[in-house]
Amino acid sequence: MGTVPAVQAHGLVKTFRDQRAVDGIDLDVRQGEIFGVLGPNGAGKTTTLKMLATLLSIDSGQAEIFGIDVRAHPHRVRQLIGVTGQYASVDEDLSATENLWLFGRLQGLRAGAARSTADELLDRFGLRDAADRRISEFSGGMRRRLDLAASLITRPPLIFLDEPTTGLDPRTRGQMWDTIRELVADGCTVLLTTQYLDEADQLADRVCVIDRGRKVAEGTPDDLKGQVGESTLQVQFEPGADQAAAAEAVHRVLGEEPVLTPEAGRMNVPLPDADRAADVLVALRSAGVSIRSVSVARPTLDEVFLALTGHDVPADRSDRDPGDAPGPGDAPGPGDAPNPGDAFDRDSTVLEAAR
């Protein structure tokens, strides 16, 4: 495949009735990298990924996977990708071995090859001891590892991971991160959607930030942090502190507007260099603003997101991406059939494979 981009998309659009879930997004994912698509729930991450994976029709725009047009040749595209969705697609009543064997058979492997592939993946993902246990007895982390294993049955060169660590404890998240790094070391390309800024910071070679269906920034994590400033002063106010006076003092000293989080009593101040922190603190003291604590550090992706969008990445999952479920009136198109073994919709996957 040479130097052809793993993913190249221009002007992707998806509309659900009167809601434009994806509004003209461009992507360029290079082979051999982890590319992060970062944004809050409802930003359009899952919808974008589903269009690229042929699981939703593209209303407008173009997309290619390794140079193959997604809309014109969806079946060829499916042979090149593996997909793991936000929720486990495995059958609760089957064991880990049976699930992987079934996915292998659905993807055209002979019985013996499906069995040996299942054994290899169980070893690779540390599930050998649980191979014969029913999935209903698995922990969340084990389910996620099995889900990822299922997407690798055909050893695809491109893997879509849609929020792969949602709901996992910190230790299990770390294990999943190690597994993702190993996949890339073995030659895979990974497109990762996430709402966790630390996850994008840890894993992604490059990051695309999207909000309300539009791309608002793209670059390496360090590039994006550099847009905020070399350093950030974080101020935690005492209850009742005059935050408006604090913002005015910062503007007077630096000529910049700070990012206030009034409900948390916090203020982030981008600094051209760390030495200016002292000037800001002197100004706050002169203005009579009461401070509980201060810290100076390099900007985080949280601050980048605040600066780019004007709001935090919400921690709850109440604002679901319309792409998480078929939109009203979104009739399946020629490219909407799922990939056998795909993790987004197991029931429709089995039906499609049986046709």
Image (cartoon, rainbow, N blue to C red):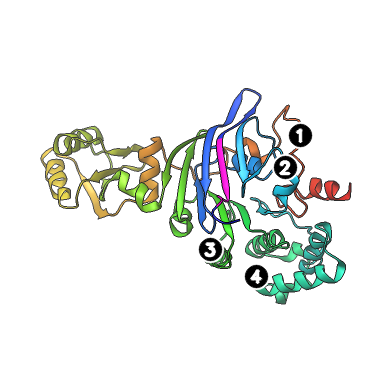
- Residue sitting at x 74%, y 65%: 137
Which residue is at the front of the view, 305 or 355?
355
Residue kind at label 1, given as amino acid type: Pro
Q: Earlier in the sequence, mark 2 or mark 1?
A: 2
Residue 146, position in %: x, y?
A: 69, 63
* Callout 4 secondary element: loop
Q: Do tag 2 and tag 4 residues touch (Cβ < 8 Å)?
A: no
Above or below 343: residue 334: above
Residue kind at label 3, given as amino acid type: Trp
Q: Earlier in the sequence, mark 1 or mark 3?
A: 3
Q: Report the disc number at residue 177.
A: 3
Count residues near mark 3 (Cα–Cα under 10 Å), then give few for <14, some for 14-19, many for 20+: some
Q: CA distance from mark 2 to mark 4?
A: 32 Å
- Seen as rendered, the residue at the extreme bottom is 129
Q: Do tag 4 and tag 1 residues touch (Cβ < 8 Å)?
A: no
* Callout 3 secondary element: helix
- Seen as rendered, the residue at the extreme front is 2
Residue 156, position in %: x, y?
A: 67, 59
Count residues near mark 2 (Cα–Cα under 10 Å), then give few for <14, some for 14-19, many for 20+: some
* Callout 2 secondary element: loop
Disc number lying in front (2 or 1): 2
- Seen as rendered, the residue at the extreme top is 18
Q: Earlier in the sequence, mark 3 or mark 4?
A: 4
Which residue is label 2 attached to? Answer: 73
Q: Report the disc number at residue 125.
A: 4
Q: Report the disc number at residue 332.
A: 1
Which residue is at the front of the view, 63 or 290?
63
The residues colored magenta run 4-10
